[in-house]
Amino acid sequence: MSSPGDTPALPEHLYVHVPLCRTKCAYCDFYSLPLAGVTEDVSSIAASLAAQAQAWLARDVRPQLLKSLYIGGGTPTVLGPELAMLVAVLTTWFPLAPGAEVTVEANPESLDASLAAALAEAGVTRVSLGVQSLDDGVLAFLERPHDAATARAAAHAVRDAGLALSVDLICGIPGQTAQSWIDTLNGAIAMRPEHVSVYPLAIEAGTPLSAAVAIGDVPEPDPDTAADMMLLAQHVLGQAGLARYEVANYALPGAESRHNTAYWTGAPYLGVGPGAHGMLDAATAAAVGFTPARADDVARLRYSVACDLREGLTPMPRLDVEVLTGEETRREDVMLGLRLARGVADDEAGAAGVTGALETLEAAGLVELVESRWRTTERGWLLGNEVFSAVWAGE
Ligand code: SF4
């Protein structure tokens, strides 16, 4: 007879993807639909997302207290008060561990004081606010559905509700000047966030911005300008006490995102909602019925939820699955660990068989070995894809 301890467990981290936005931004390739193109009402969409989460509890696995719940998108706050109800329902079905982190992503145009208060009341601890820029010209270029004043008001609402604040910013945008970027960084600091994420603008295929670049209406973003702006961000945010702990993320001490840190440290997580990703260990994957064709040495299973809001959200949608062997899992852990400032232990790199690849990267000045830990250098962070792909290839 098996004991509860033998039964594989669901992850301690849950991500729920809300596939709706007020309108689509010019650069965005995330799975989300503009509200105007959706016929279903937001309360039934929220109920369908909750049902997809609940369906995991019907499987032959034991739930664990959640250490983090992250509701992302899309723009979860377009659900309005239904978002607070979704948080309340999810945390009833998936009880939280003491001190758990509960984050919702928000956009300034859909977050006011009353919604922020309702989210706090429902148990949300942290809001990740899509500010992107505090320059109205840059926001208009990106086709964001808000201006800088609305972003400041939303940040106030978050603080007034007693919630932790994370601010998302984008740099390297065509037409964005150095002064505009400095003003945005200083304006973000004035919001008193515990956490800031800074990403260089990427031109994603299939977006209106990519079409504008292709016909020459908009210049390609300049990678050197973006690199300079990333360095400037590190300097300005660092002076405000926000230390860079991951390639794109800064935090006050102790305010690092626990949910995202789970992604970067190989912890399993459940993903729910169209386009969401999840990761399970091999035992849990087998217990919930995944029988990968490549069954030898499966150590980790990654999946993405393959369903379309326009076709309706069923409780158990199809999952597209990728399996990783033990060797691939160890390499992936090193690759993800190099995103973090603390880096990866030398013996972990050795066990993954990537010491040679790291020594080659060290010779190129992209990583360094400090006190028996491999860390990505400043230059390596600017050329992150080169570092991560070399480690993944094990070359
Ligand atoms: S708000 Fe975010 S998810 Fe929605 S379209 Fe804009 S970038 Fe994409």
Image (cartoon, grey):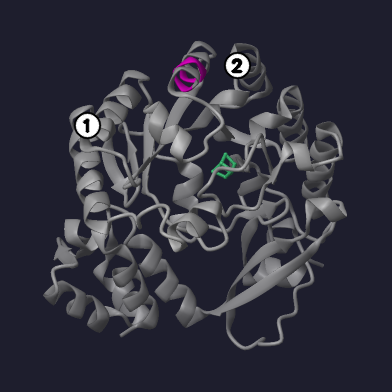
Give 261 or 281, whichever is nearer the viewer.
Answer: 261
- The answer to whether residue 374 is above or below residue 34 is below
Q: Is residue 174 left or right of residue 50?
A: left
Q: Quadrant of residue 46?
A: top right
Residue ID for mark 2: 112
Horizontal and vertical percent position of residue 347: 28, 72
**Is residue 256 shown in magenta?**
no
On residue 179, which mark appears? 1
Mark 1 vs 2, N-terminal side: 2
Mark 2: which secondary structure? loop
Q: Please, what is the three-letter code of the amino acid marked with disc 2?
A: Asp
Count residues near mark 1 (Cα–Cα under 10 Å), then give few for <14, some for 14-19, many for 20+: few
- The answer to whether residue 122 is above or below residue 242 is above
Residue pictured at 19% horizontal, 66% vertical: 367
Horizontal and vertical percent position of residue 274: 72, 54
Residue pictured at 63% horizontal, 59% vertical: 278
Q: Is residue 91 something one can see in this rendering?
A: yes
Q: Is residue 132 something one can see in this rendering?
A: no
**Magenta region: which residues?**
151-155
- The answer to whether residue 221 is above or below residue 97 is below
Q: Main secondary structure of the magenta part?
A: helix
Q: Is residue 326 left or right of residue 229?
A: right
Residue pictured at 21% horizontal, 37% vertical: 178
**Is residue 152 shown in magenta?**
yes
